[in-house]
Image: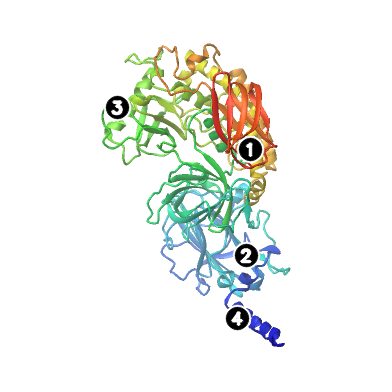
Amino acid sequence: MNDEWPDTWYMKYLFLLILISSIISPLQLFPQTIDHWETVIQHGDTWKYLVPTSEPGTTWKDLDFDDSSWDIGNSGFGYGDGDDNTIISTTLSVYIRIQFNIVDTAAIGKLVLSMDYDDAFVAYLNGTEIARANISGQPPLFNQASDGLHEALLYRGLAPESFTVDKAPIPALLNQGDNVLAVQIHNQSLTSSDLTAIPVLSVGIINISSSYNAIPWWFTPPLEFTSSNLPIIVISTNGQAIVDEPKVTADIGIIYNGPGVTNYLSDPYNEYYGVCGIEFRGESSLDFAKKSYGFEMWDSAGNDMDTSFLNFPKEEDFVLHGPYSDKSLFNNVLAMKLAHDLRHYSSRTRFVELVINDDYKGIYVVMERIKRDSDRVDIAKLNLEDTSGDQLTGGYIFRIDKGEDDGWLSKYNAYSSDLKIYFQFFYPDQRNIQPQQKAYIKNYMNDFEDAIASQTFRNSKGKHYLDYIDLRSFVDNFILNELSKNVDAYRLSTYFHKDRASRGGKIKAGPLWDFNLSFGNADYCGGDDVTGWEYYQCVGSSPFWWDAMLQDTDFINALRCRWEELRLTALHTDSINAYLDSMVNYLSGARARNFQRWPVMGIYVWPNSWFYAASSSHDEVMDYMKGWIEDRSIWLDNNIPGVAQNCERYKPPYPGLVTGIEGSIYSRYSFNVYPNPARNVLFIEGNQSIKEVVIINMLGQTVYRENFSSNLVTIDVSSISQKGIYLLSVKTDNAVEIKKIRFE
């Protein structure tokens, strides 16, 4: 070997390194950590602004644009409603520009635009779009309204939305020296009462230099998200803005390495990878900084495609629910879990951590959208040609909700109101439901309401109201809405479904939906009060028939029987607390990340109850929530009407009820097991006394067996060290049921 080889090798290596360095940004070669954050453009800085009467031209956002004819003002800009330094006249849009100086671009590792706005905006840095919200158009026209409403946040003590700038490498966006930030703000309409524009630009500095201003009190640096014990969903819209509707095409990838295994953002998309359509969803929640999304799985051509992921049955239509004002994170998840435990279909749920366009969004809940499907609302498919006979009798889904979807008005006033309930057709949807089908479900409901409105509970056809509805589903719906004191109950997000006459054919209440404002998290309609009936505390747009049923002996006796049964099983306080504790443990580190991304603790977020607003930590919220549920349950123990006698007659198929109704098949033995997956402790609840529990591995070997004599048993399973799927056999005096369970 030549003695000079090492030196020759070193020189070649150095030359190659220099060559690569000339092509690739130093930040790409040697990633730098952020030393500290500073703010370059502050709230209250001086801007140039224009209230346009025509398009300002395509160069208005460029550095060398002549803005000498524009007006001068300090941010924020608006109509003078408390958060504005510069008051402008009523307009659909306002254009603002500010020049600023960057001392050293090489010292900047990250760039964040924080934007407090009402109702939409697009922001440009040196002519390049870096962020937008709530508006479409390339670019939006000066007289274009926003795509929806968005309320400003700073004046309410909340941090504005932040947008990590990632459209291009920072050296390509920023100039050493002069730069310009340009923003166009759009209102929802000319009659809107407010408009807000407060841009703040902050930079992450990679060294100890200090050249700009201190960050605002509300600013939280972007979180460096790298891994989670939860599945990770990553969505990229490839530069498109997500809007209320329509859905935009996006790439979606899911990382999940299995129970107990850490998922890294750098891992391959091993659970799913493909195309989806995504949009914002919600009503009042659209105003929140943390948005919820609707998404559909699509094929490469943009067609709906049924897909299974994270153990959801195959379908194409899902929701990414973002808990925000619900600081517990659990309201929807708990409500869906309890409905499932009561043997009703409810949306399956799965906690994930979400990243959209390289922006960490925190903890989200994947939920199934309500649809007719054998794995969702399992009713008969109603085709266009099904306009007579048994086929016409089902299946249907209809609802009471906001909006103006096609439907019909009730013949009767709402409870304690001169308003009439508006029922909306949901399935078949607005495009496909036929006139005969509309007439059928409307007439069926009219017959039911005629019966329940009568003093004898029978209509002119001699039929009792219980001939039209499934008693158990209405009882359970009432119990879960009242236990949670859901302030939307009965009047919003309220669904009903009906199958064909040959398949039971009665109206069933449900599935349950939208429990954000429940379990003590609402400061109106008595939502934070553990006493009183929610039905009577939030009145004016609820069907009259809930009040009528509470005057009926059969309904209140069925209610009392069911309540006492459930208090020993699914609605036992220990059962609910054990589930919540297991889920808090499951979220572990993700909780801290979520509330770092969305710092809402200790701040009122509409419509928080006083304790939700005052709580400084998630643990405090959970203590309050569990205490509230326990106190609410005790109040219901003492106030549920009726007498728990002859309870068998109120269990489907309702033997002995004079109406002769027939309901769904009812299992006389059922049990719940939680947590599942399990680690150290397992709880099993049954509606009969449990005599024996056996756990068998997938090789057929018994790894646990014990005898009991109780409806609720606790099992120490810490000795089962092997992770995986097991069979759980639970035996009573007259039945044996088997379920799968996973140990982690």
- Is residue 94 in sight in this rendering? yes
Q: Secondary structure at mark 1?
A: loop
| In the image: residue 633, left or right of residue 123 | right
Q: Residue furthest right?
A: 208
Find the distance from the CA under tag 1 to the CA under tag 4: 55 Å
Residue receiving disc 4:
19
Q: Residue 265 at x, y = what percent?
A: 59, 56
Residue receiving disc 3:
390
Find the distance from the CA under tag 2 to the CA under tag 4: 25 Å
Q: Quadrant of the N terminus?
A: bottom right
* Dot placed on the residue nearer the N-terminal end, 1 or 4: 4
Residue receiving disc 1:
678
Q: Are marks 1 and 2 in contact (CB under 8 Å)?
A: no
Find the distance from the CA under tag 3 to the CA under tag 4: 77 Å
Report the mark closest to the observer, 1 or 4.
1
Amino acid type for the residue under numbered disc 1: Ala
Q: Secondary structure at mark 3?
A: helix
Amino acid type for the residue under numbered disc 3: Asp
- Is residue 526 in sight in this rendering? no
Find the distance from the CA under tag 3 to the CA under tag 1: 46 Å
Amino acid type for the residue under numbered disc 4: Leu
Amino acid type for the residue under numbered disc 2: Lys
Please say which color scheme the image uses: rainbow
Crowding around mark 2 (Cα neighbors within 10 Å: few <14, some 14 to 19, many 20+) is many
Report the mark closest to the observer, 1 or 2.
1
Q: Residue 338 at x, y = what percent?
A: 55, 31
Find the distance from the CA under tag 1 to the CA under tag 2: 41 Å
* Dot placed on the residue nearer the N-terminal end, 3 or 4: 4
- Seen in the picture, residue 356 relative to 396 is either above or below; the reply is below
Q: Residue 314 at x, y = what percent?
A: 44, 43
- Seen in the picture, residue 253 relative to 618 is either above or below; the reply is below
